[in-house]
């Protein structure tokens, strides 16, 4: 059975907005990467970048759908009186609920792994297959222990941050610095997510930190576009 950690009541629906913003930022950058790839089809890194961001954006859409299902049921059952907290919410739209959580976690890890793989040259197909297989296994076990997903996501984000930091050390470009900072901040949000089962306030902190990370990514994207127009 999937472990579910409820957000504080005063934060209901606010996380939906945060995740919507995050998904929008990722889709925006993915579309930009696709355009760049069309202009320079020799560099497939832009295509892989678009694919990874699209997968993570799609994972947020599944999370939004799942949380919306939960919150809708909570709001509806408030009319039943004092028995709201004991109502078996998870039984409502069981298939949608289970599929939403599984696809959110699976697509997030696949997207992060794809993003990490962009800078890993000469990977064999067997190695890629093995990693995807492990991600599938980890997604399955994260149903039983939610923090497994966040630990794996944190590890991947740490590796991605390290890659972008090395890029920044080489080119000293402000864009590389801000991208590094954004993924580092998103990684920190996973640290707080690991402990949400002990106190749901950590969920709020994680969501807010995640929002900051994706807003920095958005500002970096806007800055790159603006500089490109000036050069053009």
Image (tube, rainbow, N blue to C red):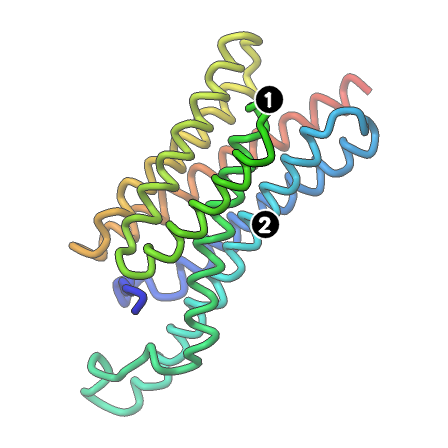
Q: Identify the secondary structure beneath mark 1.
A: loop
Q: Position of residue 181 (x, y in %)?
A: 44, 26
Q: Quadrant of residue 183?
A: top left
1 or 2: mark nearer the eye? 1
**Tag of residue 193:** none
Residue at 55% x, 16% y is 174
Residue at 69% x, 31% y is 46
Q: Are marks 1 and 2 in contact (CB under 8 Å)?
A: no
**227 vs 118, nearest the viewer:** 118
Q: Position of residue 161 (x, y in %)?
A: 44, 26
Q: Position of residue 101 (x, y in %)?
A: 42, 63
| Other residues around mark 1 within 10 Å, as few (<14) / some (14–19) / many (≥20) | few
15, above or below 96, in the image: above
Residue at 53% x, 47% y is 56
**Tag of residue 121:** 1
What residue sits right under mark 2 in the picture? 24
Q: Quadrant of residue 122?
A: top right
| Other residues around mark 2 within 10 Å, as few (<14) / some (14–19) / many (≥20) | some
84, above or below 64, in the image: below
Give the CA separation, mark 1 to mark 2.
Answer: 29 Å
Describe residue 164's horizontal placement relative to residue 83 as left or right.
right
Describe residue 8's horizontal placement relative to residue 199 as left or right.
right
Q: Position of residue 51 (x, y in %)?
A: 64, 42
């Amino acid at each position: 059975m999937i472990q579910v950690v409820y957000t504080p009541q005063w934060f209901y629906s606010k996380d939906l907005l945060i995740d919507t913003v995050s998904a929008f930022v990722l889709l925006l950058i993915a579309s930009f990467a696709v355009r760049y790839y069309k202009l320079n089809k020799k560099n497939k890194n832009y295509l892989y970048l678009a694919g990874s961001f699209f997968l993570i954006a799609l994972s947020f859409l599944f999370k939004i759908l799942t949380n919306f299902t939960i919150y809708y049921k909570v709001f509806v059952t408030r009319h039943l009186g004092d028995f709201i907290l004991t109502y078996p919410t998870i039984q409502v739209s069981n298939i949608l609920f289970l599929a939403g959580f599984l696809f959110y976690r699976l697509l997030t890890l696949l997207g992060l792994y794809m993003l990490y793989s962009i800078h890993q040259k000469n990977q064999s197909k067997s190695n890629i297959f093995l990693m995807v297989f492990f991600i599938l296994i980890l997604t399955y076990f994260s149903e039983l222990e939610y923090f497994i997903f966040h630990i794996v996501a944190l590890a991947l984000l740490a590796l991605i941050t390290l890659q972008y930091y090395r890029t920044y050390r080489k080119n000293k470009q402000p864009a590389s610095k801000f991208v590094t900072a954004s993924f580092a901040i998103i990684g920190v949000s996973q640290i707080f997510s690991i402990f949400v089962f002990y106190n749901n306030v950590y969920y709020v902190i994680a969501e807010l930190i995640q929002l900051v990370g994706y807003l920095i990514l958005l500002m970096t994207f806007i800055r790159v576009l603006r500089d490109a127009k000036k050069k053009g």
